[in-house]
Amino acid sequence: MKRGTTLFLKIAVILMGIPVLALCLFLLPQIANEANEAAKRGADVAFVVYGILMVMYVSAIPFYIALYQAFKLLSYIDKNKAFSKLSVRALKNIRNCAIIISGLYAVALPFVFIMAQVDDAPGLALVGMVPIFASMVIAVFSAVLQRLLKEAIDIKSENEFVV
């Protein structure tokens, strides 16, 4: 693969991380402050918001681990090590991170349902399911790629023994 293509993908990986970092640094603390003010006024919903915010902050950790693994995978492709056990391991780590993210948001889903009932916004429940399904799609996709890559490596090693 040409280096320009992987460079574009590396830039895309970095650009994917910037909005999440901005969200964690600017928007989520502002929401936490507003929930704190609501808790001082006696609103019980504030503690539901704290639960959702905690899941969002914790899910940023596996998200950035997955982005780092994707960056490493692109580096392996640049170094012509795409068909190596390192690439398989990177895909496995991406899959595991996606499963963790999906699990975290599945834990947060009851909190989202409570918020949807309080705000009388049934669409909020559907929006709460989006991260679960998106991360599961990524997990399945990386698992399929991992299996295909592992089979390709096995075929490659068998061919090297034959020759």
Image (tube, rainbow, N blue to C red):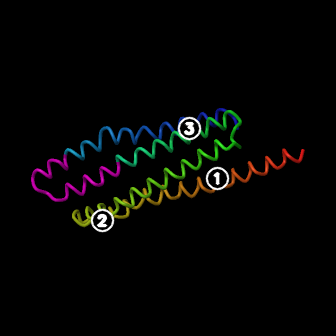
In this rendered view, identify the residue nearer to me: 110 or 128. 110
SS of the residue under disc 2: helix
The amino acid type of the residue labelled 2 equals Phe
Residue at the (25%, 67%) spot, across then down:
117
* Label 1 or label 2, whichever comes before in sequence order: 2
Which portion, as a residue range, is magenta?
34-56
The amino acid type of the residue labelled 1 equals Leu
In three-dimensional space, the C-alpha distance between marks 3 and 1, rounded to whole angstroms, equals: 16 Å
Query: Could you tell me residue 18's position as x and y percent?
Result: 42, 37
Left/right of residue 29 with respect to residue 154 in the rendered view: left
* Label 3 or label 1, whichever comes before in sequence order: 3
Crowd band around label 3 with a 10 angstrom C-alpha radius: few (<14), some (14–19), many (20+): many
Predominant secondary structure, magenta span:
helix
Left/right of residue 81 with respect to residue 25 in the rendered view: right
What residue is pinned by disc 1?
Answer: 145
Quadrant for the N terminus, please: top right
The amino acid type of the residue labelled 3 equals Phe
In this rendered view, identify the residue nearer to me: 105 or 12. 105
Membership of 90 in magenta stretch:
no
In three-dimensional space, the C-alpha distance between marks 2 and 3, rounded to whole angstroms, equals: 35 Å
Left/right of residue 57 with respect to residue 83 in the rendered view: left
Query: Could you tell me residue 11's position as x and y percent?
Result: 53, 35
What residue is pinned by disc 2?
Answer: 113
In three-dimensional space, the C-alpha distance between marks 1 and 2, rounded to whole angstroms, equals: 34 Å
Q: Which mark is residue 54?
A: none
